[in-house]
Image (spheres, rainbow, N blue to C red):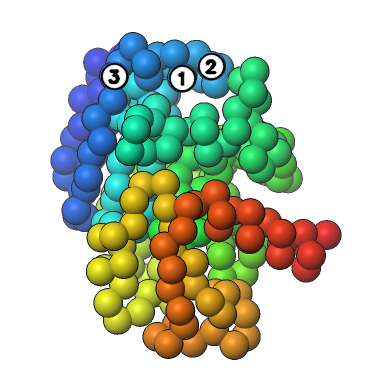
């Protein structure tokens, strides 16, 4: 891996204004994942995968890496077969959040340049362009105004739920975040496998948008 890239990555993570939980990885395993996905080794995404099993930022955002027994890998969440991601066709999911949101890199799903990051918003069931590439997204996740970004999804005491939510889990809020009936303070909250949130949200998205 490019040493300069590694040093830059360590610096921006170390200088983050948020609490960071690093789940260290194995470089040899990371190299296999990078190769399986066909990524350029001299990119920030490849560096993250090579170095980390995952990162948790501010208890909210989970940056996907090579994965291990406690963190779902980027290949697992994307259901990669022969190097092709299948969970959300035409994208590569690179991060998630505890509310069921997903950050995905465009491959060919959206009318936008390849490499652009889109956010699946669980409160609208829509994909929102962030006008960022991966390196810009990572910097934003580490240093941006994510408190404002997530303001409408938080409730008093959300941190306690976040502390109990594992890397491959999310918080199922009911009534759903996208529903007119939801009142975030009184809505029920249950910790579930993140794949369950994907399945529920995609089912309703298909019902409403397709």
Q: Residue under circle 1? A: 33
Label 1 element class: helix
- Residue at 28% x, 25% y: name it: 25
Q: Secondary structure at mark 3?
A: loop
**Residue 94 shown left or right of residue 17 in the figure:** right
Instruction: Find disc 2 in the rendering and name its residue.
Output: 36
Residue identifier under label 3 = 26
Look at the picture and state if 74 lies above or below 147.
Answer: above
* Along the viewing direction, whichever of 192 and 156 lies nearer the viewer: 192
* Residue at x-position 78% and y-position 68%: 208
> In what quadrant of the picture does the C terminus appear?
bottom right
* Crowd class of label 1 (few under 14; some 14 to 19; many from 20; radius 10 Å): many
- How crowded pointer 3 is (Cα within 10 Å; few <14, some 14-19, many 20+) is rated as some
Does the rendering let one see residue 162?
yes
Q: Left of 112 or right of it: where is 73?
A: left
- Residue at screen point 26% across, 68% down: 159
Gap in angstroms between the C-alphas marked 3 and 1:
11 Å
Rate crowding at label 2 as few (under 14), some (14 to 19) or many (20 or more) other CA atoms within 10 Å. some
Expressed as whole percent of the image width and height from the top left, the position of residue 207 reads 79, 65
Mark 2 or mark 3: name the one nearer the start of the chain: 3
């Amino acid at each position: 891996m490019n040493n300069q890239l590694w040093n830059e990555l360590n610096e921006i993570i170390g200088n983050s204004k948020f609490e960071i939980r690093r789940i260290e990885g194995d470089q040899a395993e990371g190299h296999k994942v990078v190769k399986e996905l066909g990524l350029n080794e001299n990119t920030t995404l490849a560096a993250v995968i090579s170095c980390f099993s995952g990162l948790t930022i501010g208890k909210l955002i989970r940056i996907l890496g090579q994965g291990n027994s406690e963190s779902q890998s980027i290949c697992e969440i994307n259901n990669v077969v022969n190097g092709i991601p299948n969970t959300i066709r035409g994208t590569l999911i690179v991060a998630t959040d505890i509310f069921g949101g997903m950050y995905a890199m465009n491959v060919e799903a959206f009318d936008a340049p390849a490499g652009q990051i889109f956010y699946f918003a669980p409160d609208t069931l829509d994909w929102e362009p962030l006008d960022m590439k991966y390196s810009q997204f990572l910097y934003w996740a580490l240093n941006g105004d994510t408190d404002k970004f997530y303001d409408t999804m938080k409730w008093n005491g959300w941190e306690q739920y976040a502390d109990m939510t594992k890397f491959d889990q999310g918080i199922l809020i009911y009534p759903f975040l996208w529903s007119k009936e939801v009142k975030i303070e009184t809505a029920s909250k249950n910790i579930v496998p993140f794949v369950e949130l994907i399945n529920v949200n995609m089912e309703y998205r298909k019902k409403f948008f397709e």
